[in-house]
Structure formats: C-alpha cells, structure tokens
Amino acid sequence: MRKYFNTITRIAGNVVTVNAPGIGYDELAVIESAHGESYAQVIRLEGHQVTLQVFAGSQGIGNNDRVRFLHRPMQVCFSDALLGRVLDGSGRPRDGRGNVLGEMIHIGSPPVNPVRRRMPDRMIHTGIPMIDIFNSLVEGQKIPIFSVAGEPYNELLARIGLQANADIIVLGGMGLRHDDYLKFRRSFEEGGVLGRAIMFIHTAADPVVECLLIPDLCLAVAEQFGLQGHRVLVLLTDMTAFADALKEISIIMEQIPSNRGYPGDLYTQMARRYEKAVDFEGAGSLTILACVTMPGDDVTHPVPDNTGYITEGQFYLRNGRIDPFGSLSRLKQQVNAKTRDDHRAISDACIQLYALCRESREKRDMGFEMSAWDQKLLKYGNLFEQQIMDLAVNIPLFEALDRCWRILAECFEPAETGIRRAILEKHWPKPQVRLEPTQKELATVGA
Amino acid sequence: MKETDGKRTTARIIGVDGSLVMAETDGRVVQNSLGYCIRSDGARLLSEVIRVRGRLADLQVFEETRGLRVGDLVELHEEMLSVVVGPGLLGQIYDGLQNPLPELAKQVGYFLKAGVYIHGLSRDRRWRFTPQVKVGQIVEPGDTLGTVPEGIFEHRIMVPFSWRGQFVVERIAAAGEYTVEDEIAVVSDSEGQRRVVTMQQRWPVKRPLNISRRRLMPEEPLITRVRIIDSMFPIARGGTYCIPGPFGAGKTVLQQITSRHAEIDVVIIAACGERAGEVVETLRDFPELIDPRTGRSLMERTIIIVNTSAMPVAAREASVYTAAALGEYYRQMGLDVLLLADSTSRWAQAMRELSGRLEEIPGEEAFPAYLESRIAAFYERAGVIELRDGRIGSLTIGGTVSPAGGNFEEPVTQATLKVVGAFHGLSRARSEARRYPAIDPLDSWSKYPGIIPAADMAKMRRLLVKGNEVRQMMTVVGEEGVSVEDFTTALKADFFDNCYLQQNAFDKVDGATPAERQKYVFRKIMEAVDVDFQLRDKTEARRTILEMTDLFRNWNYAAAGTEEYDRYLKAIDQFIATKGRKP
C-alpha cells in the first residue's frame, strides 16, 4: 500500500516542506500535482518537517498536493543498453526511445579507498601539441578547461572526446543551449563514437534542480563501467551552471553564504564529484574533463578558484588557444619522462622562451628599442604560435617534439635555449633545416 | 577510538541537516564526547557532540548521514575522540579517524563504507619487549617501562599519559614477545589500587600531549635539502611554518619533497581535504624509496593520514588532530617528528561548514569567530621539549594554506601568519614562469637561524631586492634607460635565482642538496657575484652572465664526487679567475 502525505507547509523556490514522520535523510520522494509527477530529494529533517528539493521545480504545486516517499536514494539504471542513449537530469530518456532496462544503482556512491587506486601513468594522446607536449592528459585525471563565454570550449571538449580513444564516453550537459547539445550529438555521430557514448543532458530550459543531478548520474554510470574494466572518459559542461544551481538551492535554504553568494560547502560539493576520477587497481579508469566558464574572465571567482584547488591542473582556453602559462597538468610528470628523453626538456625550454618573448613584446609595444636577443625571441614567439599553439594543429606527440626542435634551431644558438648539454647534443637538428618565414612573420620581426 | 567501556546514555534524533544531527536526551551529555548514530540498517555512525543546549545535543557525524531518520537512536559516550598509540603506527596509512585503510580495503573492497571501523593497531602482531624497570621502582606517567624495536627505532612503552601521580611497579613482563593487548606491567597507585599496563594506550586527539620538564627554544635548523628553504628561509626543529599559495603553485609538491628529504626521525603526512591522487603517489612511492640516512624504506619512518576531499567533512577536521596526537606520541620518545598538514584551509572550511549549519554568527568570509584561536592552538602543539629524563624531543609543524583566489589577505592565511615562525609564500607569477620551488624570495621570511651566516643571507637578499628594482625600472624606461652596472646587477640577481633558489625537484641530484653542498655552492655563488666583470655593454653582460649560469646549472646537476662535478667546478673557478678582477 502506498502511503501519501499531503500537508505541505512551505513552498519557496524549488524547495518544498512537507509534514511526514519516519523519513530518511537524502531519500527520494515523488510529488503529484496537477502538472504531473516530479521527483524530489530530502535535504533537511526537522522533527516531522521534511524539506525536499523538487527536481521539476515547484511551479503549480499546491499545499495539499500528495507526496509519496520511495525510501531509497536517487538511482539510475545501468546496463550496456545505455550506450548511444540520451537521458535527462532525472534519468529519463530524452531521445524519444523507450526506458532503459537494467540494474538500478545508487548515485553518489561512497569515495574510493585511496589504497585501491593505482597511480595514473598512462598518457592519453589527444593530437593537440599544447596538451600532449606541455600538459599531458593522463588516464584517471580530472582536469577542467577554464574559459569564458564565446570561446570554443565545447568544440574543444568534443574534439578531445573524439580523439582520446576511450572505451566509453559519458557526456554531462548542464545548462546547455539546445544547439550546443545538437552540436555535440552531431560531432559524436560524425566521429563515429555515438555507439559508445551516453549523454545526460540538462538544457537551459529545464528545471534548475535537474542540473544538480547531472554529474552524479554521469559519474555513477561511468564508475560502474570503470569497475567492469572499461576506460571511461566523462565530459562535463558547464560546471559553473552546476555551482550556480547549488547557490540557488542554498540561498532558498537560508544558508549563510561564504563568498559571492555561494554556499560554504561549494568546495566539498564539487570535490565529491571530481574525486570520482580514478584509475582502479585491477579494473578500468574514469577520466574527467570539465568545462568551467569564468564569469568576467576572473580566475579568482569562487567557481574556478575552488575547481583549481580540486582538479589536477587546468587548461586555459583563451583567444581560441590553450594558454601555455596558466595551463597545467599536475600528472604530466607521471608520463612525460617515459615518452621520449627530450620531452621534459622541450616542454620547459619552449615555455620559458615564450615567456621571455612575451616580455620582449611588451617592451616593443611600449616603444623600446629591440636588442638582437629580443628579435630572436619575437621570431620564436611567432613561429611557436603558428606551428604549435594554434588549435588547428593536429599532429602526434613525436612529430610535435621534432617540430619544436626545428623552431628552436631556426631561432637560437643551442646554449641560449637553457637546455642541458646532454639533451642538446642528442637532439639539436643537424644539418639545420631552414623554415621559410611567412610574409606576416617578416613584417612583425621587421628584420 | 572505536570500542569504549565508559558510561553511556542514549538520545533520539530530532533533525538532520547535512553532516549535522540534532538529538534529544534525558541523560548526561558531555561536550566533545563521542556518539554513535544508529541507522535503521544497524550501521553505527561515529559522531562527536559539538553543542549542548538543555536537553538538545548537536552532533557532527563523521560519515555520510544518508538514511538517518528522525527517531533513530544515538548512543552517547563519555569518552572523547581519541587515538590508540603503541608500536605499529609507523608505516601505517590511516583515515582521519585512525582506521587503517589497507585493512579496510581488504574487508570492504574498492569503496569506503560508513560505520565500518577497525582498530588502529594490529592485535595479532607480536613485538619483542625488553623491560627497563624493576619491581618496586617508582614511575610516573610518560616514564619508560621497556622498549620494543619498531623499524629503525627503539619504541618506548610508557606509563599511560592520562594517569596522574606516582606508581610502584608491582610486576613487569620478562623479555619476550607480546601483542599490544598483552599485559606487560602491573603498577599500583598511592592508594594501593592496581592497574594493568599494555603496550597500547589511548589519547584524546584534541588535547595536547606534552609531559616534559620544560619547553626549549627551537634553534636547530631542520634540513629539508630544498636550497631556498635551508639557505634563505630556514625552518627549525620544533618550529612551525606555513606555505600559502594559489592552486598550481606547488604547495603539495613542496610538501612531498620535504617529506622525502627532511633530515628528521619521523614524518607524519596529514592529507586533509585534498586530492586522493597525490596521496596515492606517496603511498606507491614511499615503500620503494630508500632513506639514504638509514638504508631502509622511507615508509618505515612515515605515517600517512588521509582524508581526501571526497571523504566526509567532519572527519577532515579530526584528521589534523589525529596527526598532531600521533606526532606528540613519538616526541615523547625523544624523537624528532615533522608533521606536514596539507591543507589547513580545508580544515578551516570544514569548521566553516559546521559553523554555518549550527547557525553561529559568522565572522569574515563566513568563517567562525573562533577560527584564529583554533589555528593558533593547533600550531602551538609544535615545540622542542626536554623530557623528564633529559632527552630532547621535537615536533615541527608545517601547514599549507590554500587562500581563495590566491589572495593572502584572507582569514586563514592571516590567522596562520600570526602564529608561525617561518612563511614560505608561493607566487603565481613564479610558478607560471616555471620557477620552482615557487617560494617568493622577496615576500617570504623566517625567524629561525639557518646554515648560512646571517650577513651572507642578508647580502644576497639585498641583491634580489636591487635586481627587482632594476627590473621594475626597466619596464618603465626600457633596457636602454638603465646603466650597464644596474643592468648587470639585475642579471646577477637572476643568476642567483636561476642557479640557487630554483631547483629541479624531478632530478635525482638537483632535487635534494645536502647542507654541506649548499654551504659550498652558496659561497661559490657569492664569489661569482662579487667578480667585477668589467663589462662594456649590455650584450656582453648578458653573454657573460648566461655563460656563468650555464656552468653553475650544469654543476648543480652533477653528483658530488663524479668527474663531471670536478670538471664544472674547475670551469667555474677558471671562469671567475679569468673573466674579471676581484673588487
């Protein structure tokens, strides 16, 4: 027999309070109103007052509508039948096909015991030199793309998803524009990966609470595939929308905000999701790549700031390029010593020289005289930007390293690169290959 | 901390909000005592009383509260959150509540499970005990009754610290093998009451453990083999220091390097609310790494406390105290202990989260008003002590701080700076330019004496300051706007930075520089900086300093005693002798 409660004492925002005894914390409920049924989740217990966040929003709910408790936390269906499917933030199909059948699993599983994690040490090749050479992506890593509205971050995310060669791709869209969703779908289709992709999509038009569940749904499913031995890549976009949804709920709950209205547990909430990234000892792996848009291009904004402290590095996407200075992959040391002996040396030298080039450019822009050294740096900077940094460049790692050597040889004497002698002697191109400078380059160098 | 025999009362849950549970009771409630929330499926969730209002007790639960209901039973104990101490702590990997994680993995698999607690020490392992007291001898709490070998140390079995007064040894176990639960002595107090001593005892984590004659001044440098720390911003045995820095500046890497190379007896790593991956690196690497001073695995001197960001928040707060209590325990044996807490900001955030749920009036950035006093009390647990038998023990605490937005003006950094003896501030500008370790040499400071004479340290610091001034001037007036002399000064400051302050953590040789080599290289660098190169123009200046930098850098990579080392040293001496004349 189903038991219903119909004394709703408070409706505010997407939060509803109902009078019901014997309810467990974090349990799932169903609210039936004239507008249909919606799932809701218990977020506070006070005596018999049970506070629920309503997934579909509280519009149209009346104070005598019926609430039914399911006595279990939120679940999602897990089976191979999920592959190729598109679901919404409540786990229902949104591709017009029938329900997915399979085992029901709880979302928000407990954390992995650190002693059962293995040290991530397998590089994921993306074909993007700014990632492969300078900030290698590693299986089991969690890393965001920091960007601002207008930058092609979703395209970059989709491209990495396609080229990363994962067994299974799980896409979580939060606050996505509908055409962005269609773009993802199309690129997965064209890339031939739709059959091994699962999409959980919340669009900007959907109720905000459903956005909160997207990461948990994605990660619960991904974790199960990982335990089965698959290498899973989870793409989340945009985590800022997720944080904003958290903010909305916590304000309605009258929690004291800590920073710019975000709740004090923002770090914990996000960490709990990102920390699902894992390389299981004796099973598969789960890699998380997330987009974080920075409001006002401000990296000290609470969302990118907290994210940076949680994730293992970050890629900055700025002006259509991956910025070499702010970007960092904390796990690159695990892999870049094993690729080729010059990998680390090239990675360090190219960035240091590019940093010097930036200084020279500043000097030039302020109208100062350019020394011979400055001229070399300027030339280097241009070549580096065109042949390595440009996002259109799509070449394997070794080819990219060779290209870096050619650029260095084109611009500098060996000792000027600051690379150790042993490495220089082995890799410095000989005989020197002359790269033809472009017209534009000649103009900027002003030689 | 799991099994207690003390008095207990019961309460009923009347509310649940995140990790906070409100309960109602008719019995006695003790602030900071332990409780268990009993979930309907029988799981017992460890909690701590953090507020008492009349018949209401507010508890923070060290587990996920999912599934708890109004009306569920809470068992309240009188005992406070405590750790079990005894032989077998070294080499262990614990969570914040002292559950051994490898053991937990054996029992419950890949994932952690709420309500599963395991005793912190092996109950089966036998230790070879050697008595050190005789029947009839008078002993006090903290006095040694005997020893057992634990790795490279003689682990002292001491009279329980929580007892008061003097005791007469009635019985002492003969030399032989015992488990931590076997009786090793019986003592009687002044009233003739007999008490049994085993090799393990409990200590409440939030109470400082310090049984000593007096506290001493921390003066002896603690060598970390990180040049910029040992030579410019030293830390002392028994002292405190903090490493604030924005994300990506290398706080954790710096802590990892320190935990490997520090010249100290015992290292306790408290990974508090940070990434699991970083802990895994330590877990996997340490057993393989050999401590050059002892020839044994680094793990034998290390205890790791892990409470990663995904683990329950309340246990995060407990983890730093657990680490401090274990550190103090080894200090009582006359050992030098280093506690590395990463990151204290996560601990502060845990306090903020609970304070918010308790609806306390918030202070700055919603942190609770008692933030400062809690931080101060934590760092005050460090110190050098002279034990009652004259031996010296020390506990050094180094904490990282993760300030929001990398801005040091925030409450946690400011509260920490007030109480520590050294400040290693990491800068984003330095880390972005790949100048590691990214400790800012202009902002950082230390109140402790180091291995380099103070005058020399001050001189090189002046060079850095002057170099920075010239650099700033050049951004305004350009390279042509400064004199060759000033320009050379800036280059020399860069040279010192490049060849001494920066260090390649991933290189075997450069990654760790022993104190003797540091002193030698420092003198050589000063010699090189003092040379008047008689430079005519800036191009020549740049070329000369670049050449010098190249020589020193390669020298840094050469292992001492190799032909390569001698070759570069010779080249440097020749360079100094020929390139100019001494002033």
Image (cartoon, coloured by chain):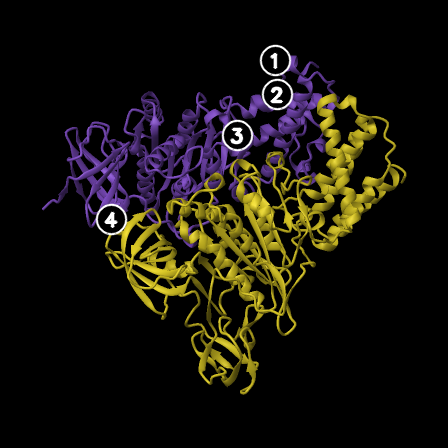
Chain colours: A purple, B yellow
Query: Distance from label 2 to label 3 (Cα)?
Result: 16 Å
Instruction: Residue at 54% x, 28% y: name it.
Output: A323
* Residue B319 point in image, percent of width and height: 46, 55
First reached walking from the N terminus: tag 3 or tag 1: 3
- SS of the residue at dot 4? loop
Dot 3 falls on which chain?
A
Mark carried by residue A440 = 1
- SS of the residue at dot 1? helix
* Residue A200 point in image, percent of width and height: 30, 33
Mark carried by residue A129 = 3
Residue B152's place in the image compared with B218, above or below, is below
Q: Which residue is mark 2?
A: A382
Q: Nearer the viewer, residue B85 or B304?
A: B85
Instruction: Residue at 25% x, 39% y: name it.
Output: A52
Query: Distance from label 3 to label 1 (Cα)?
Result: 23 Å
- SS of the residue at dot 2? helix
